[in-house]
Image: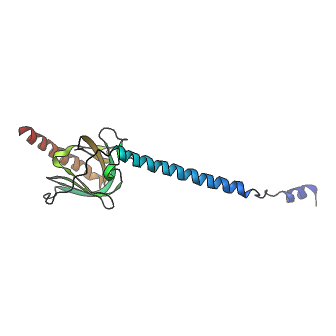
Amino acid sequence: MTPVLLLAAEKESAQVTDWAARIGWVVGLALFVALVYWLMREGWKWRGTLQGDLPELPVTPDDPGPAMLSTSGRYHGSTTAGQWLDRIVAHGLGTRSRAELTLTDAGLDVVRPGAQDFFVPAAALREARLDKGIAGKVLTEGGLLVVTWEHGDRLIDSGFRSDHAAEHHEWVQKLNSMIETNTREGAER
């Protein structure tokens, strides 16, 4: 054989001999990931503690009346009104979930399988609009139905995405019409 062929035949990958160092790195990385996850979870719980002054969420009245509008979709969370990154996590408002929305004369009923349901009384509704984002979710322009409502001494924005996004405009018109009527009736009293 020629010397070049002998050299080529002898070249092989070096075998891994330092298994302890590799296992140490893997364990260290796993511990780092666990630490980051734990810190995120503690931050979420701390945010809930800071928002502990938020009163309990209203429940649906026994007879809310006939449904004016109804849809199903996703609830993407709630934030302090006007601050789309200031997520509210108290009372489960920060939990994303499927949702069924029903608008009646009494208010907006939000039924969330696997999460806490809540009801927004008609008198607490302040505004409805189309937007592109809320904490943790950004969509195309107008892809999110945002309902502003008052709870305790806070204004809250709650974001919804219907399974049929074309319904959003009808929801905005109906909610704003209802809010305007309630405001006018309140001023006449």
| Residue at image location 19% in from the left, 55% down from the top | 69
Name above or below for residue 117 compared with residue 40.
below
Place of residue 82 in the rendered image (x, y in percent of width and height, measured from the top left): 30, 38
Name above or below for residue 60 compared with residue 186.
below
Place of residue 187 in the rendered image (x, y in percent of width and height, measured from the top left): 9, 38
| Residue at image location 71% in from the left, 57% down from the top | 20
Give whichever of 103, 117 is nearer the camera.
Answer: 117
Quarter of the image with the N terminus in it: bottom right
Asked if residue 154 can be seen in this view, the reply is yes
Quadrant in the picture for residue 62: bottom left
Quarter of the image with the C terminus in it: top left
Q: How many marks?
A: 0
Asked if residue 133 can be seen in this view, the reply is no
Place of residue 181 in the rendered image (x, y in percent of width and height, measured from the top left): 12, 43
Place of residue 123 in the rendered image (x, y in percent of width and height, measured from the top left): 16, 46
- Describe residue 38's horizontal placement relative to residue 26 as left or right: left
| Residue at image location 53% in from the left, 53% down from the top | 34
Q: How are the colours assigned in the image? A: rainbow
Give whichever of 181, 139 is nearer the camera.
Answer: 181
- Describe residue 38's horizontal placement relative to residue 74 as left or right: right
Give whichever of 140, 36 is nearer the camera.
Answer: 36
- Describe residue 75's horizontal placement relative to residue 153 as left or right: right
